[in-house]
Amino acid sequence: MRTSLCDTFGIEYPIIGFTPSEHVAAAISKAGGLGVLGCVRFNDAAELDAVLDWMDANTGGKPYGVDIVMPSKIPTEGTSMDLNKLIPEEHRAFVDRTLKQLGVPELPDDTDERAGVLGWLHSVARSHVEVALKHPIKLIANALGSPPVDVIEQVHAKGVPVAALAGKAEHAVRHVDNGVDFVVAQGYEAGGHTGEIASMVLLPEIVDAVGDRAPVLAAGGIGSGRQVAAALALGASGAWMGSMWLATEEYLQTMADSQAMQQALVAASSSDTVRTRIYTGKPARLLKTRWTEAWSAPDAPEPLPMPLQNLLVSQAHNRIHAAHDPSVVSMPVGQIVGRMDRVRPVAEVIGELVTGYEEALSRLDKTR
């Protein structure tokens, strides 16, 4: 399992693993892939800096990258208090009523809550870029498409390539025109923010559109070595994976109280996800639970645009997480969740990807 991507990043396998956990990201890199740390959970640049210091010390000299979230549509600036004024009272009332109906308790008074919205603002995302460039990162990815051109130029000036996710071929063309170095073709099956075209159709369309100008990574529906082989056969230079790492032992080292979330994921089938705007205001695939079902009820309001929806449900997410109830978990995850049947170490996931890839090639050889 080796492509030109391995030489570009100095990695053993063309597997790029996105995760909000520094422990998972470090484990992916040490196992031969490229761990990419999601930065959106860091509202404080100093906190991100400290975590990247930890990454520097715990990746064994292996390369790693970071992922930022830089939305392009307003409202993108201002304080949480300013944005709060834009949230309709009917939406607040619905959230409060729903949490009560679901039996989600209030947070203790001494709980240190995360505001949730700050990591989605341009100003914070730019601070993430500035902090990350002080570390030996090998990639900066933007989960919402092309970063502003000046940000791309800033990153390139430090010799770091930029990746951007695309759900359509025209998005990929625009990314490359803007100076993006790697395009992540993210299919409909993927967790989190995702488009409407399935990976089997999307990947070759994007490869045909920009493959002669930039390497393309395949994302969405990848959780086995034979799926990696299929992605490479369709023209990808590597696999971008996110959901699979949620059910790993290392994830709990960062998010120690995530047992209920992992329990829900392990019990889910590939049909137990839903694509909805209730998480951030943009279409995102989530685990289907009583929380997501409540938002599809006839009396539910329409989700607000980003970042207002994120701010609206921020405290709700904190309360849901603290409730430790698998039936109401609010978690982005792809349809590959059906393969996540147990919690295991990152190295075991990587090992099975490599073995499955080799077995797939062996089967193909026998059909000649």
Image (spheres, rainbow, N blue to C red):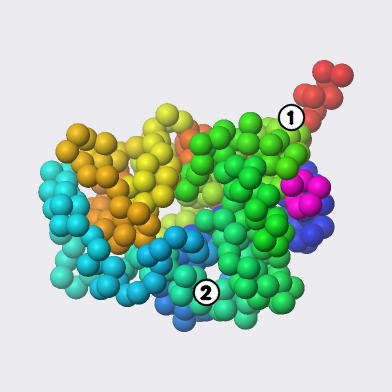
Neighbourhood count class around disc 1 (C-alpha, 10 Å): few under 14, some 14–19, many 20 upward:
some
Q: Which mark is residue 262?
A: none
Residue 23, visible in the rendered structure: no
Which range is magenta? Answer: 210-215
Magenta span dominant secondary structure: loop
Q: As drawn, which residue projects farthest toward the right? A: 368
Instruction: Tell me the kind of residue under disc 1.
Output: Ala
* Up/down of 105 relative to 57, above or below: above
User: Magenta stretch containing residue 213, yes or no?
Assistant: yes
Q: Return the x and y of residue 53 as percentages of the image width and height.
A: 57, 78
Instruction: Tell me the kind of residue under disc 2.
Output: Arg
The local secondary structure at tag 1 comes to: helix
Q: Which mark is residue 126?
A: 2
Residue 242, visible in the rendered structure: yes
* Up/down of 205 relative to 24, above or below: above
Image quadrant in which the N terminus is located: top right
Label 1 and label 2: CA atoms lie apart by: 42 Å
Q: Which residue is mark 1?
A: 360
Q: Return the x and y of residue 130 as percentages of the image width and height.
A: 57, 78
